[in-house]
Image (spheres, helix red, strand yellow):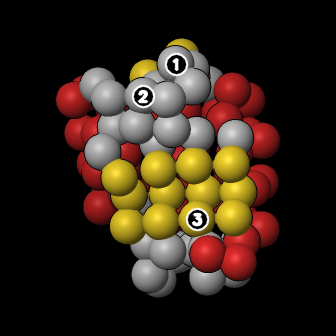
Amino acid sequence: MSINASENVFSIEGKGLKLDTAEDVQEFVNSIQEIKNLEKAILSGNTFGVEAAQTIAEALKGKKTIRVRSIFKPLSIYLICFFFQNKN
């Protein structure tokens, strides 16, 4: 995991992680929440299950200036976008 708070970037790029549950991504959620002005989340090269995608989306939803770089699996990007848009 790479966190560069001075550049407002969170990255788990290319780790080959298979993240299925909220527990699997909790460390990443904590890191995302620590970066006050997060501008970029790089999640590519990993696979996200439904629950993990929803949990990441909830963490990203509160960020006003966020850009998410592509995710390796099309289903994963779909899930994160879906939960990101539909969280009230």
Question: For this view, does 66 lie left or right of residue 35?
Answer: left
> Which label number is shown at residue 16?
1
Residue drawn where x is 72% and y is 71% of the image: 5
In this view, the residue in front, 49 or 87, is: 49
Label 3 amino acid?
A: Val
Using a 10 Å C-alpha cutoff, classify the residue at mark 1 as few (fewer than 14 neighbours), some (14 to 19) or many (20 or more).
Answer: few
Question: For this view, does 6 lie left or right of residue 78?
Answer: right
SS under mark 3: strand
Label 2 amino acid?
A: Gly
Label 1 amino acid?
A: Gly
Residue 75 percent across, percent down from the top left: 25, 27
Disc 1 and disc 3: Cα gap in Å? 19 Å
Residue drawn where x is 42% and y is 28% of the image: 45
Label 1 close to label 3 by CB (< 8 Å):
no
Mark 1 or mark 2: whose residue is earlier in sequence:
1
Disc 1 and disc 2: Cα gap in Å? 6 Å
Reading the image, the residue beneath label 2 is 45
Disc 3 and disc 2: Cα gap in Å? 16 Å
Residue 70 percent across, percent down from the top left: 30, 45
SS under mark 1: loop
Vertical position of residue 79 compared to residue 37: above or below? above
> Which label number is shown at residue 9?
3
